[in-house]
């Protein structure tokens, strides 16, 4: 038998089976990764993943964190290292629980963040919460599960807490504020505003609520009188993180940061939204060191 040696610049396979991903061969070769590709090591992994819903929320987060655009496949992400914490953000396609879940899955598919944070505006429903305040939610109450019967439509609330580590991080952040639970920030135009920061549950469903007598608000008050605000996406994020733990074998941390833009009543207006979104983004920036997993 004569054995010959062959020099190959690249990959050589004699009859076997092999899979090659995210690789390139040759001079000036490049790899075009798609959004469905898994992360390829610690250099790609984000410590904090951020989901926004509205363009004004995305603008506020991008400006507050000085994020840069990064196009991967057909999706646009926003990335930076902020105060030593790696951040990757994405804006959902549209409002609602399903789109929030899809946005989270896109983040996980590319950057696999250690914690996902839903950031933006919400409606305050507790008497202690004012427009311009920020709510930090580590517990979600989903109000849209219900049974339709001839005699009525009783609601079946569902609650989901975030992992305990998130609650400890929020407590530490609030304690370090001076005074606790209060913050003064400056907006991009140079105007300083003071606000209160509240920690507590958030109600989530599919409704845009603009009626203080709405059945949804009455139900939430009866379910837990400490619920501070409402939104349309926290339920989806909490559920997505909860279900992903079955596949990964580890807890997936999440929380919600909502700047209060209205009282979920008939006076609901778009006017305070930009300030509320900015407040939420600024609180997120200050939260980042507390959300980093030191282990």
Image (cartoon, rainbow, N blue to C red):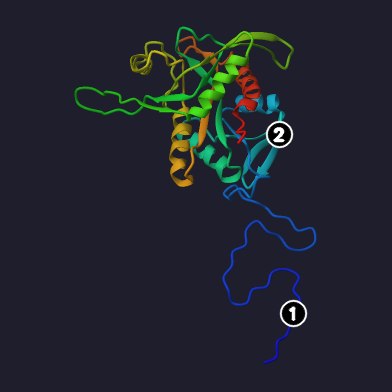
Marks 2/1: CA–CA distance: 46 Å
Element type at mark 2: strand
> Residue 188 in the image: x percent, y percent?
72, 17
Image height of 209 relative to 110, above or below: above
Q: Name which of mark 2 and mark 1 comes first in the sequence.
A: 1
- Which circle marks residue 130 in the picture? none
Please report the residue visible at 70 percent of the width from the left and 15 percent of the height from the top. 187
Q: Quadrant of the N terminus?
A: bottom right
> Residue 273 in the image: x percent, y percent?
58, 17
> Residue 93 in the image: x percent, y percent?
54, 36
Q: Quadrant of the C terminus?
A: top right
Please report the residue visible at 25 percent of the width from the left and 28 percent of the height from the top. 148
Please report the residue visible at 65 percent of the width from the left and 21 percent of the height from the top. 286
Element type at mark 1: loop
Residue at the bottom extreme of this rendering: 1
Residue ID for mark 2: 81
Q: Please give left or right for residue 196 compared with residue 233 in the image.
A: right
- Nearer to me, 38 or 219: 38
Image height of 123 relative to 105, above or below: above
Mark 2 nearby-residue class (10 Å; few <14, some 14–19, many ≥20): some
> Residue 70 in the image: x percent, y percent?
69, 40
Q: How many discs mark residues in the rendered view?
A: 2
Residue at the front extreme of this rendering: 295
Could you say which quadrant of the image residue 15 lies in?
bottom right
Image height of 7 relative to 171, above or below: below
- Nearer to me, 172 or 155: 172
- Which circle marks residue 6 in the picture? 1
């Amino acid at each position: 038998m004569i054995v010959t040696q062959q020099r190959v610049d690249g990959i050589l396979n004699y009859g076997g089976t092999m899979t090659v991903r995210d690789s390139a061969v040759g001079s000036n070769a490049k790899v075009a990764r798609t959004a469905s590709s898994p992360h390829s090591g610690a250099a790609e992994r984000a410590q904090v993943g951020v989901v926004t819903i509205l363009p004004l929320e995305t603008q506020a987060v991008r400006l507050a964190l000085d994020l840069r655009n990064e196009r991967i496949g057909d999706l646009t992400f926003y990335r930076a290292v902020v105060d030593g914490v790696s951040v990757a953000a994405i804006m959902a396609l549209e409002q609602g629980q399903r789109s929030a879940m899809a946005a989270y899955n896109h983040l996980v598919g590319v950057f696999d963040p250690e914690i996902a944070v839903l950031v933006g505006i919400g409606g305050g429903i507790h008497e202690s919460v004012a427009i311009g305040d920020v709510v930090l939610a580590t517990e979600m109450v989903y109000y849209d599960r219900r049974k339709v019967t001839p005699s009525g439509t009783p609601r079946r609330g569902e609650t989901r807490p975030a992992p305990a580590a998130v609650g400890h991080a929020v407590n530490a952040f609030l304690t370090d504020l001076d005074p606790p639970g209060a913050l003064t920030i400056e907006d991009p135009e140079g105007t300083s505003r003071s606000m209160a920061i509240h920690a507590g549950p958030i109600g989530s469903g599919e409704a845009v609520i603009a009626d203080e007598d709405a059945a949804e608000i009455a139900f939430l008050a009866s379910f837990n009188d400490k619920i501070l605000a409402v939104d349309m996406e926290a339920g989806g994020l909490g559920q997505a993180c909860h279900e992903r733990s079955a596949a990964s074998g580890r807890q997936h941390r999440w929380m919600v940061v909502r700047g209060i833009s209205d009282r979920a009543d008939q006076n609901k207006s778009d006017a305070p939204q930009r300030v509320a979104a900015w407040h939420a983004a600024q609180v997120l920036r200050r939260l980042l060191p507390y959300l980093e997993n030191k282990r």
